Image (cartoon, grey):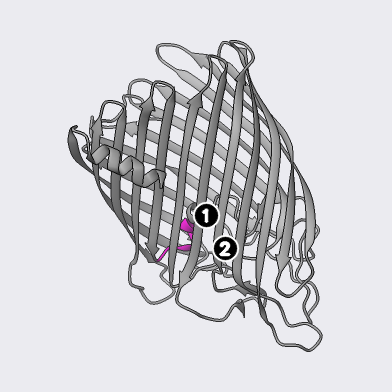
C-alpha cells in the first residue's frame, strides 16, 4: 500500500522525467562448479548486462524504475557449448518527504530467469552456504518503511520487508552428485515477511541508542526428507515465527571512527508438518567499526570490520540455526579516479545440522568464505573500468566427517561500465 501511495503521489505532481541507460560488460577466467556438488571446472565467462532506467522527480519526492537483462555465457572446454542464461530484473523504488518530519520509502526487486551458480548468493544472500541450480528462478523482494521525527532527540521508524523465492520447473528434490554425495536439486518455495519497529534516541552529539523488536514469519515448502528406516523420502512444509528484541548503540569514538554495538535474543517457534513443534533461543549480537585510517589530498584509506551472531533460517535446507559472520574491508581512494579495495567475509553456523538418513547423517554446506580485490578506474565521466580477482568456497561445518572446502570459485576479471548517469569523481568499489 505504501508503494502504491508513493506512485500515486508522484504521478499526481509535476516534475522532470529523466531516462538513462547503463551497460556492463564483463569477461572473466578461472574455475567454478557448474552446480552444487560438482567439482570446479576451468572456464571462460562473458556477461553483458544492459540496463534502462527512468526517473520521475519533484522536490521532496522521487520515483524510479529500472529494467536489466543479464546475459551469461560460458565455455568450459570439456563439454558442449550451452545456450546463454538470461535473467530479467525489474527494480521499482520511491522516496517521499511527506512533511518536514516524515519520510516514506518503498522498493521492490523482481527477478525471473536463469542464474548461474556464481550469481546465486546475490539472490539468496552472501551467507547462504548450500546452493541449488534450477532451470529458472522467480524471486521478489520488497521493502517499505517510514521515519517520523518526534523531537530533536527521538525518531520512530517502521520497516516492513518481504521475500519470495521459487523455482520454475520441477525435478527430483535430492539427487546424488558426481562424487556420491547427496545434493539438493530443487529450490523450495520460500516466503518471508519481517516487521521491525524501532525508536532511536540521540543521547549526545556522539551517541545514538536504538531499541527495536523485529517479528519475522517464514514459510518453506516443499522440503524433502532423506530415506530413513527403510521408508522412501517424503516432502514436508516448515513454518517459523521469530521475535527479536534488541538494543543497539552507535557511537562516534573519534573524529573519523564510528563503532556499532548490538545485543538481543531471537525467540523462534518452528512448526513442521511431519514433526513436533520446537522453540529455539538464539543470541543476537554485533560489534563493528568504521574508521578512516588516513586522508590527504592524494590518498584516503578507509577500513571497516564487523563480527556478528544472528539467527538464520536456511531457505533451501529448512534448518534454523545461529550463524556467525566476520567481515573486513580496506579501501584506498586515489583522487580523482582510482580506488583499490580488499574485502573478506567468513560465515558459519555455530554447530553442525546433519539430516538423518539410512546412510547415516548427511552434512550439507554450512560454511562460506569469500575474498575480493576490486580495482576501479574512472576512464571518463561516463565510463568506468574495474578489474581484479575473486575467490569463494563452501564447506560443511568443521565437525562434519566430510569437512573440507570443495566448491571453489577463483576468478580474474575485467569489467567495463558505460552509463549516461552522473559518475562521482571518486567511485568506491
SS at mark 1? helix
Q: Residue at x 52, y 65 (%)?
A: 33
Which quadrant, please, contains the C terminus? top left
Q: Residue at x 33, y 53 (%)?
A: 90
Residue corresponding to mark 2 = 131
Is 344 one of the magenta-colored residues?
no
Give yes or no for contact between labels 2 and 1 (Cβ–Cβ under 8 Å). yes
Q: Quadrant of residue 287?
A: top right
SS at mark 2? loop
For this view, does 147 lie left or right of residue 6? right
Mark pair 2, 1: CA separation: 8 Å
Residue corresponding to mark 1 = 121
Q: Quadrant of residue 206?
A: top right
Residue 371 point in image, percent of width and height: 56, 43
- Residue 309 visible in the picture: no
Count of numbered badges drawn on the protein: 2
Residue 264 tag number: none
Residue 370 point in image, percent of width and height: 58, 47
Of pointers 2 and 1, the one earlier in the residue sequence: 1
Above-or-below relation of 142 to 39:
above
- Local crowd size for mark 1, using a 10 Å CA cut-off: few (<14), some (14–19), many (≥20): some
Q: Quadrant of residue 195?
A: top right
Q: Residue at x 54, y 32 (%)?
A: 157
Q: Residue at x 46, y 52 (%)?
A: 141
For this view, does 145 lie left or right of residue 57? right
| Magenta span of residues | 114-120
Q: Nearer the viewer, residue 370 or 247?
A: 247
Amino acid at each position: 500500500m505504501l508503494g502504491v501511495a508513493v506512485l500515486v503521489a508522484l504521478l499526481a505532481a509535476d516534475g522532470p522525467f529523466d531516462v538513462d541507460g547503463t551497460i556492463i560488460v564483463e569477461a572473466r577466467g578461472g574455475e567454478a562448479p557448474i552446480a552444487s556438488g560438482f567439482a570446479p571446472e576451468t572456464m571462460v565467462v562473458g556477461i553483458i548486462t544492459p540496463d534502462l532506467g527512468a526517473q520521475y522527480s519533484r522536490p521532496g519526492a522521487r520515483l524510479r524504475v529500472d529494467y536489466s537483462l543479464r546475459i551469461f555465457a560460458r565455455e568450459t572446454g570439456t563439454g558442449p557449448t550451452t545456450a546463454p542464461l538470461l535473467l530479467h530484473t525489474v527494480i521499482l523504488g520511491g522516496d517521499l518527504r511527506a512533511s518536514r518530519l516524515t519520510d516514506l520509502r518503498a522498493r521492490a526487486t523482481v527477478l525471473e530467469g536463469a542464474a548461474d551458480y556464481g550469481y546465486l548468493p546475490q539472490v539468496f544472500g552472501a551467507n547462504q552456504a548450500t546452493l541449488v541450480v534450477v532451470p529458472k528462478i522467480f524471486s521478489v523482494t520488497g521493502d517499505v518503511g517510514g521515519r517520523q521525527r518526534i523531537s530533536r532527540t527521538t525518531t520512530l521508524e517502521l520497516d516492513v520487508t518481504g521475500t519470495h523465492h521459487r523455482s520454475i520447473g520441477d525435478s527430483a528434490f535430492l539427487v546424488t552428485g558426481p562424487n556420491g554425495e547427496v545434493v539438493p536439486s530443487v529450490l523450495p518455495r520460500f516466503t518471508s515477511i519481517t516487521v521491525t519497529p524501532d525508536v532511536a534516541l540521540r543521547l549526545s552529539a556522539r551517541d545514538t541508542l536504538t531499541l527495536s523488536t523485529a517479528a519475522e514469519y517464514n514459510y518453506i515448502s516443499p522440503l524433502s526428507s532423506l530415506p530413513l528406516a527403510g521408508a522412501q523420502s517424503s516432502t514436508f512444509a516448515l513454518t517459523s515465527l521469530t521475535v527479536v528484541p534488541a538494543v543497539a548503540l552507535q557511537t562516534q569514538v573519534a573524529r573519523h571512527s564510528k563503532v556499532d554495538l548490538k545485543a538481543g535474543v531471537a525467540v523462534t517457534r518452528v512448526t513442521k508438518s511431519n514433526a513436533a513443534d520446537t522453540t529455539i533461543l538464539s543470541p543476537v549480537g554485533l560489534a563493528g567499526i568504521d574508521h578512516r585510517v588516513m586522508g590527504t589530498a592524494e590518498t584516503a584509506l578507509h577500513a571497516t570490520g564487523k563480527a556478528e551472531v544472528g539467527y538464520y533460517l536456511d531457505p533451501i535446507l529448512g534448518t534454523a540455526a545461529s550463524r556467525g559472520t566476520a567481515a573486513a574491508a580496506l579501501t584506498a581512494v586515489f583522487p580523482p579516479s582510482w580506488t583499490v579495495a580488499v574485502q573478506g567475509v567468513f560465515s558459519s553456523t555455530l554447530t553442525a545440522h546433519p539430516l538423518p538418513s539410512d546412510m547415516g547423517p548427511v552434512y550439507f554446506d554450512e560454511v562460506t568464505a569469500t575474498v575480493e580485490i576490486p580495482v576501479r578506474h574512472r576512464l571518463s565521466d561516463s565510463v568506468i573500468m574495474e578489474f581484479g580477482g575473486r575467490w569463494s568456497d563452501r564447506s560443511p561445518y568443521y565437525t562434519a566427517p566430510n569437512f573440507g572446502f570443495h566448491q571453489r570459485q577463483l576468478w580474474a576479471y575485467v569489467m567495463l561500465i558505460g552509463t549516461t548517469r552522473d559518475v562521482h569523481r571518486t567511485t568506491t568499489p
